[in-house]
Image (tube, rainbow, N blue to C red):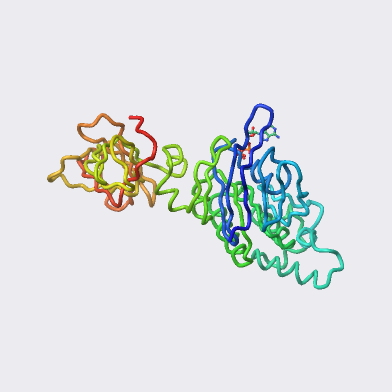
Amino acid sequence: MTLLTINGISKRYSRVQALDNISLDIEAGGRTAIVGPSGSGKTTLLRIIAGFEQPDTGRVTLEGDLLADGQATVPAHKRGIGIVSQEGALFPHLNVAENIGFGIARGAAGRDARIAELLDMVELDRNMLTRRPHQLSGGQQQRVALARALGRQPRLMLLDEPFSALDTGLRENMRKAVARVLQAAGITTILVTHDQAEALSFANQVAVLREGRLVQSGSPQSLYRQPRDRETALFLGDAVILPAIVRDGLADCALGRVAVDGSHAGKVEIMLRPEQIRVVTDESNSNYGGRVVEVEFGGATCTVSVSLEGVALPPILIKTSSVALPARGDRVRLDIAGKAHVFMGRSSG
Ligand SMILES: Nc1ncnc2c1ncn2[C@@H]1O[C@H](COP(=O)(O)OP(=O)(O)OP(=O)(O)O)[C@@H](O)[C@H]1O
């Protein structure tokens, strides 16, 4: 069931077309990540959903209620939408209990118990209730902000880069904790982030914006494996992109003959994710061998650069485990797992 419908939303700021005819459905109970490079319109879209901005044209509806249609708009505080931003935006002069209880009427029955329950939900210790925001770590502040937003029992939760100020380890833990809390509460969530790994791991729907347009939306798996174009492929992760000639589901390219998805034929560009390519140190019987020109040790995952023999292409970068790493100068064979993806557009090579 669709909870939120974004239909034909456009927004212009003087000379900048921040959003250009965006349509997107958000399923009830799901987690959607809106990703895109800086300036692609993510925050503008989120602010329009929240009610802090008005679209020039288009409609936003939540559970069938019209929130905005370019003329009328429901004010932000009447939308039943929670928002947690990067700064957390806690009230510095209020303690944790007062911050969490901000949206719960004073004197309401069971108010203290509800505050304690919300604190438990975000997995914070009860002894934090009397602390002020400056006495909390960044991650703890974010949890309090989430608890405060949950306290209002929103129909939809918006997360605006809430993890970006946290460092890597904490960020991952927070992402998992927040996903757990929201899932347990059954709250539909939209996360805005410029971090593609965060989007892919957090969401069950990813929407990619570029220059105000929705380039593609779908499951993380489908976007990662079948990106619409080269830019989307590279935005979502590392990719090996090669010119190829495709016929009958097979591509002839610099790596030899590779199985491809779709039913395209002719001159195209194909894409492989680096983890689909396995470097095999085996000199026997290979027409498409290469030579290792660089090995970059990276702990669990290492990068091996292989220069293909007889092909005027830059070296191919392959992610591989640190076990049995080849050495620089080794002659290797490249084995492909799964199918290469064919971009729908014409080949530029
Ligand atoms: N209030 C405003 N006035 C004028 N231009 C604006 C305003 N808000 C946003 N823009 C412009 O609209 C475009 C989209 O901005 P937006 O903040 O939505 O992008 P974003 O994808 O969230 O970027 P970032 O990841 O850097 O936050 C940008 O070109 C931005 O400069």
Query: Measured from the top left, where is residue 113 in percent x and y?
Result: 76, 72
Q: Residue furthest top?
A: 15
Image location (x, y in percent) of residue 30: 57, 59
Residue at coordinates 16% horizontally, 40% vertically from top-left?
287
Report the quarter where the N terminus lies.
Answer: bottom right
Report the number of discs: 0
Q: Which percent across, then down, holds residue 36?
A: 54, 41
Q: Residue at x 45, y 48 (%)?
A: 223
**Identity of the residue furthest to the right in this view:** 107
Of 105 and 113, the residue lying toward us? 105
| Picture quadrant of residue 126 | bottom right
Q: Quadrant of residue 178?
A: bottom right
| Residue at the limit of the structure toward the left, as seen here | 285
User: What quarter of the picture does the C terminus occupy?
Assistant: top left
User: Can you give x and y, in whole percent of width and height, for residue 233 in the image?
Assistant: 43, 42
Q: Is residue 96 left or right of residue 158?
A: right
Nearest the eye: 86 or 17? 17
State whether residue 345 is above or below residue 125: above
Left or right of 328? Residue 77 is right
Left or right: 331 in relation to 23: left
Closest to the observer: 169 or 40?
Answer: 40
As drawn, is 74 to the left or to the right of 215?
right
Dividing the image into four equal quarters, which quarter contains ligand 1? Answer: top right
Of 242 and 149, which appears nearest the observer? 242
Q: Is residue 42 above or below residue 106?
A: above
